[in-house]
Amino acid sequence: MSVTKKASIQRRRDQQRPTDAGWRQELYDIIFEAETPSGRWFDIVLLIAILLSIAIVSLETVEGWSSVSFLEAGEWTLTALFTLEYLMRLACVRHPLKYARSFWGIIDLLSILPSYVGLFLGRSSRSFVILRSIRLLRVFRVLKLWRMMDEADELGTAVWRARNKIVVFLAVVLVAVTISGTLMFHIESVAAVEFDPENVKTTQFTSIPQAMYWAIVTMTTVGYGDVVPQTIVGKVIAAALILLGYSLIIVPSTFVTAEIMSHTTHESKITCEHCGVEDVREDAAYCYRCGTRL
Amino acid sequence: MSVTKKASIQRRRDQQRPTDAGWRQELYDIIFEAETPSGRWFDIVLLIAILLSIAIVSLETVEGWSSVSFLEAGEWTLTALFTLEYLMRLACVRHPLKYARSFWGIIDLLSILPSYVGLFLGRSSRSFVILRSIRLLRVFRVLKLWRMMDEADELGTAVWRARNKIVVFLAVVLVAVTISGTLMFHIESVAAVEFDPENVKTTQFTSIPQAMYWAIVTMTTVGYGDVVPQTIVGKVIAAALILLGYSLIIVPSTFVTAEIMSHTTHESKITCEHCGVEDVREDAAYCYRCGTRL
Amino acid sequence: MSVTKKASIQRRRDQQRPTDAGWRQELYDIIFEAETPSGRWFDIVLLIAILLSIAIVSLETVEGWSSVSFLEAGEWTLTALFTLEYLMRLACVRHPLKYARSFWGIIDLLSILPSYVGLFLGRSSRSFVILRSIRLLRVFRVLKLWRMMDEADELGTAVWRARNKIVVFLAVVLVAVTISGTLMFHIESVAAVEFDPENVKTTQFTSIPQAMYWAIVTMTTVGYGDVVPQTIVGKVIAAALILLGYSLIIVPSTFVTAEIMSHTTHESKITCEHCGVEDVREDAAYCYRCGTRL
Amino acid sequence: MSVTKKASIQRRRDQQRPTDAGWRQELYDIIFEAETPSGRWFDIVLLIAILLSIAIVSLETVEGWSSVSFLEAGEWTLTALFTLEYLMRLACVRHPLKYARSFWGIIDLLSILPSYVGLFLGRSSRSFVILRSIRLLRVFRVLKLWRMMDEADELGTAVWRARNKIVVFLAVVLVAVTISGTLMFHIESVAAVEFDPENVKTTQFTSIPQAMYWAIVTMTTVGYGDVVPQTIVGKVIAAALILLGYSLIIVPSTFVTAEIMSHTTHESKITCEHCGVEDVREDAAYCYRCGTRL
């Protein structure tokens, strides 16, 4: 992350930092920042709590586990914890109302409300699961933790640098998917019906969107097998499309690789002003060829 | 794209450019060229219209959506638009008849005709979908837009440079597929029948072409699962073939990667003005072929 | 493997080496070391014996083969061999009791006990197969053979160097899997039920963990097809997730590649004797850090 | 291919080359060599004939096509052609009997015999297809054609250079497959039976070899879906194994890539004796740095 970007994020955050030195400022640094050790610990505990609450939401959808008592107990403990955290966040920011109406403020509220509302109304419907899943979004907030990690940053940068190639790649894939899908629909469904009207019931290529779904599932080599060609001509065309599509996917993904690697391996070379070699390491103190102090 | 190639494409196009400066020449530049801002906008609008019409053709094949009124309305709006575009193209070219008989002229006509014919005859058959799908081909015309994009050009060049390796790769794959297919057919079908004549009904390797279809689906790791070995020997051979085939696919696709990357990473080559070699290192002091000081 | 690491392993082993030169020391070198030719042969024979016993354990689970006599004969021959080996190991180490209580000593005992116990109790249950499978762990002991091979060592080093990137990669995959799984469960199961209550029986996304299992199987392009989306919205979202997930998997695995390759291709690094930096270019005339003439 | 290897192949072949200059020597050069234009044409025609005969053998196994007359006509034409070729080969070699007893001599005979034998006995069984498929092996003989192509040669060399890594890779895969297979069998089959004896009927992990087949199909991301985990624990373990196995496959295949690429891009560099630069192109006439004639 560049210094400018970091500074801009810092400035935005500081608008909410309490001006008076005291417990509110200390609490703010723990809850909203990750630079201090206690701030880091707070984020790690919060991450584990969020992951646990997601695990509970997930397990409650498994048949037979929906009313297990320790899941419910865990759910209430975590809801209490998140409520406490929400109140603490409100307590330590400079403008509580402004925070409550911000994006993360609303997400924080939405991740505790459903449990309380469910208490009054009873859990009548599965829809409550949807609302509770909003907690998942809070994982992204804690990700500020690893925005600090160089690896994740490098990954993001590489993907960003290759964005043009990714767009061309997606465009090529979409055109290929549309053409393959339309072709296979006509072969498997329309042509089969022309020759044998009873066939229309058994074909799995029931519509062009369905055939395009098949094309994506096939070209990415996922290959579920829920939609497969059944006529001989369909199988021949499918085999040809698989080989073609395989090349289509391989070649552009290679491009992304090339993009990333050229920046990983040759990223930071400088020129020696004395002898003119251009591939001196950026962190070198002396030129490797002429020995001049850089 | 080299300068020579661009010039040759330009010359071919210019044969249809009206000689008299006026509205026809301006219209021609908008419709047939993509260099001017309005020409670019025309292409983008046309691309969206084509994609929309493809979406409508696709959705009409979904059961229950075939007579939704807004789809029909959209279809007619787009047909009107394409008709207008066709007439405009005829109006602004130097020789309208020559254009009407050219490849793109016929495609343009074929993409509007089925809608009008369908009006008189009624939509009795699914075959009309096939005719309307011809519009898909028109996407390629608009692709002149991104032939300008360096990424797509680079991609094409890389694939072209690796063409020999792709041919060897396809040959190796085809030989492997034929041998695997024949082998598996004998094991799963013929051998099984010799031992247990009732087996012939249940085997999924009903013929050698079917077994070759299995081999392609397996070696590209698509793995639908509609054709799978069922005897123990068949499974052992299949497992061995998967591992072998995996290597066969991985190694040559690596070759394509190597080909692309060697051209991507060492891109900065200069030309020797004395002898004309084009791949001199950028940091060279002397040409490696004629020894001229650069 | 660095010299220091080798020495430390050597020292640990030597604690069990008999002090008196004689048959015990010779036997020890054959059984516990792999440097001498006879020690190498012992390991190879042992490896084959272990693999054979694993093959027998495997084949006995195949229906109809569980009581084939030559399998049972082979089993008893190998058990006798392993018993002899266990006794020999006990005989040649300096402190037999210490060996018997060490990790490998217990594994050695556990891999022969079940056969003898089964003799007295009769093979009443399939559980005995589990106990006999412990022998599989002994393969790792013989792997000291190929810890000597440079290739395996290099592989291990490369994976170790890329460990940070692998962790980030797994974290990204897990977050993506959780989000995809929760999303698809809501679309395929909850949303479908809201519109059509009878749908709950047929959906394959019965719970969020099931949907997460689907997401892993899909994003790694395995694609069994035992869980597939069945609603139109579900298929559209699934297709988008496949393309996104494909990129998610491709890009980080490229990172691991880049990591490995940067160490493989620029291998020839030399050490500066003056300041001790280890990654000086082989063709350097001066150290890049201290500027000493090399 | 190295010059020595080429010479050794040449010498072996020359033992059969007729000593007397005349039609036999000319025929020999056409049939057995591929250096002359007519020799190349002979090989191409032969390759097409073999591919055609394989296509006929394949198509005859398709239900309903087994007695199509033009297939039978083609079969007899090709058999006649192969018989003529066999007689011509016998006619032009120096020692016909020695050729008839060589590997290729026997293959040549075996690829025409079944058709004649079938004429006398009638085609009673599918076993004849097996015998006729031997013709497939003859494709390899014609491959001498593309042993001349640099790409195929380079591919073979790269695979050969990476052989040690491929062996380690296969060993790692086999150990991983055995452990995964044994583990999944115990979880899906044995453990399930202990808890619920009725389960034994429905599990798809019927034996350890079956579970190992599943592990190979899964770890290579083929994923047929004919064998899938059905218990919750099984699915969790399977998901973990997929992610682990994915890494196991990705990392070593990267090694093969690294091996190939380091030889492709840096294959042939020479050292300038005057200034000492080491990465001068092998085909350079002058050093790129000091301009010295090499």
Image (cartoon, coloured by chain):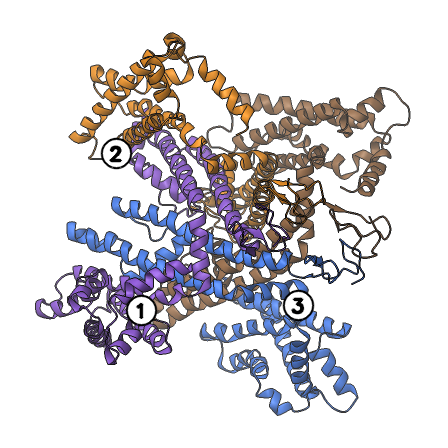
Chain colours: A blue, B purple, C brown, D orange
Q: Chain of mark 2?
A: D
What kind of residue is marked 2?
Answer: Leu
Q: What residue sits right under mark 2 in the picture?
A: D59
Residue at 45 percent across and 17 percent down: it is D13
* A96 over B147 or under it: above or below: below
Q: Nearer the viewer, residue A4 or C292?
A: C292
What x and y, as percent, mark residue C55?
A: 56, 30
Q: What residue sits right under mark 1 in the picture?
A: B51
What kind of residue is marked 3?
Answer: Trp
Residue at 60 percent across and 47 percent down: it is B291
Q: Secondary structure at mark 3?
A: helix
Q: What residue sits right under mark 3 in the picture?
A: A146
Q: Quadrant of the C terminus of chain D?
A: top right
Q: Nearer the viewer, residue C144 or A80?
A: C144
Q: Chain of mark 1?
A: B
* D41 over D83 or under it: above or below: below
Residue at 85 percent across and 37 percent down: it is C11
